[in-house]
Image (spheres, grey):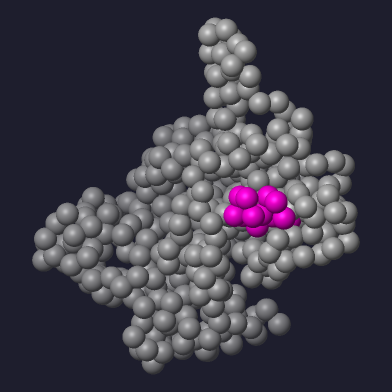
Amino acid sequence: MVKNVGLLEESIVQTLSVALQLPVSLYEGNRCVLSLPAQLTYAACLLGKPGPLESLKPGQEQTHSAQFLESLYGEKFLYVQLSAGHVLLLGAFLCEPLDGKDVYHLIRSLRLSTGDYQPLLRYYRSLPVMDEARFFYLGQLLDMLFTGTQAMPFASMTSSQALEEQHRFQNAAKKRIQLFSHPPFYLEQEITHHIANGDRKNALRVMAEINALPRATLAQDPLRSLKNSLICSCALFTRAAIAGGAPSDDAFALSDACIQSLEEASDLRSMAALEEPMMLSFIELVEARMQHRLSPVTRAAIQYIDDHLTDKITLASIAQAVYVHPSYLSQRFKQDTGEVLTSFIQKRRVAEAKHFIRYTNDPISQIAGFYQFCSQSHFIQVFKKHTGITPQAYRGIQDSAEA
C-alpha cells in the first residue's frame, strides 16, 4: 500500500477492501496513490498494456454517481469520482467465472499471444465473481457514501409515493447496468446467423438495432474505445463468414485489412462509417462461397469446428453437436466441400496459426500445442502440406517482407 495520502483516505480504502472483499484503488489523476492489495494485477498489465484507469472511460452524463465499467478483456469495475482528479476504483471482478475455453476464445478474438493463456487463466480464476444485483446495490451504497445520494426513504412515504420511487429506482438500475453491457447475446447470435447465411437485409437490420444501444466503453479515449469495439465486431464478422463457408484464409486476410483501416482512421465519424461496409465485405465472401451451396448440416459442422479449433475435435463430437450420425456427417461434408473432415480441420487450424506465426514471437511448439497438434513435428508436417513451406520459413518470409 502506498502511504502518501491522508489517514482518512487510507482508512476508506482499507474499510472498503475488507468489507467488500474486492481490490480497491485510489487514483490521483492517472496515478494510483493507494491500493489494497498493494500490488494489483490486471489483464492489461499482464499483456504489457496500460492499466485499467487509462483504458476505462466513465459516461459523462453520470460523472457524479458510481458507474459500472468493463475492460476490453471482460473485467468489471466500479468507478466513483470522489472529487476533481480523485477517483476510487473497485475491481477487477467478473459477472461469471471464465474457464479455459473462454480464455482461448479471448486469445483468438483479440489475437493475443498463445503464451498469454496460462497467465490469463490464472488471473481470471483469481478474480471475485459477483452477480448483477449485488454490484448494482454496491453502486447504490457507494453513491450514498461518497456522492451525496440519499437512501430511498420508503418508511416515511405513502404507498403511491413508494411505488413511484421504486419505479424510478428500477429504471435507474436498468440504465446503470446498460453502462457496462455489450449488445445482448441474442442479437450477436442473430447477426452472426444472417452473415453466415449471406442475408444482407436482415444483417443490416440487426446492426441498426445493435447500434441503437449504448456501446460498451473499452478505453478512456473515445476514439480508442470505438476502435476496440469495431475490432471486436470484426472478429465476430470473421467467425460468422467462416461459419458460412467462406475460406478461412480469405476471411482472416479481410479481417487484417479491416483492422488496419480502423487503426488508420483518425476521427469518430469516419471510423463509425467503416462498420457497415466492413460487415458487407464479409457477407460478400459468404455469397461467393454460397455459389457452391452448403447443406445446413455442413454449415453447422463448420461453425462447430471454428468455435473449437483449440479443443480436441473428433468426428463423433461434431456429429453429436449437429445431431446427425457420424457416417452421414462424414459423407455429406465430403459431398458439400470436396474435403474430408480431418483435412478441413487441419487447414482451418493452419490458417489461423499463420497469424500467431506472423505477428508474435511465440515458439512454434507452443502454437502447435495451442491448436491441439500432438507434436511440433506433426504441426510442421501439416503446415507444409497446406502451405508448401514450414512454419519457420513462413515466419522468415514475413520478417523479410516487413524489414
Residue 178 visible to the viewer: yes
Asked if the stretch drawn in magenta spans residue 16, the answer is yes
Q: Can see residue 268?
A: no
Seen at 66% across and 54% down, the residue is 17
Q: Is residue 354 above or below residue 294?
A: below
Residue 146 x %, y %: 76, 37
Left or right for 199, reference 117:
left
The C terminus lies in quadrant: bottom right
> Residue 314's x, y, as percent?
23, 71
Residue 248, compared with residue 76, is above or below; it is: below
Against 383, is 292 above or below? above
Marks counted in the figure total: 0
Viewer-proximal residue among 346 and 75: 75
The image quadrant that residue 369 belongs to is bottom left
Q: Quadrant of the N terminus?
A: bottom right
Residue at image x 43%, y 63%? 99
Nearest the eye: 253 or 70: 70
Q: Is residue 346 above or below residue 69?
A: below
Write the residue at 47% across / 39% down. 184
Left or right, residue 92 beside residue 403: left
Q: Specify whether residue 199 is painted magenta.
A: no
Residue 235: % across, % down: 51, 56
Magenta region, residue range: 14-25
**In the displayed structure, does residue 328 sit left or right of residue 351?**
left
Furthest residue in direction bottom, as rendered: 377
Q: Residue 350: x, y in percent?
A: 41, 76
- Seen at 87% across and 57% down, the residue is 5
Q: Quadrant of residue 289?
A: bottom left
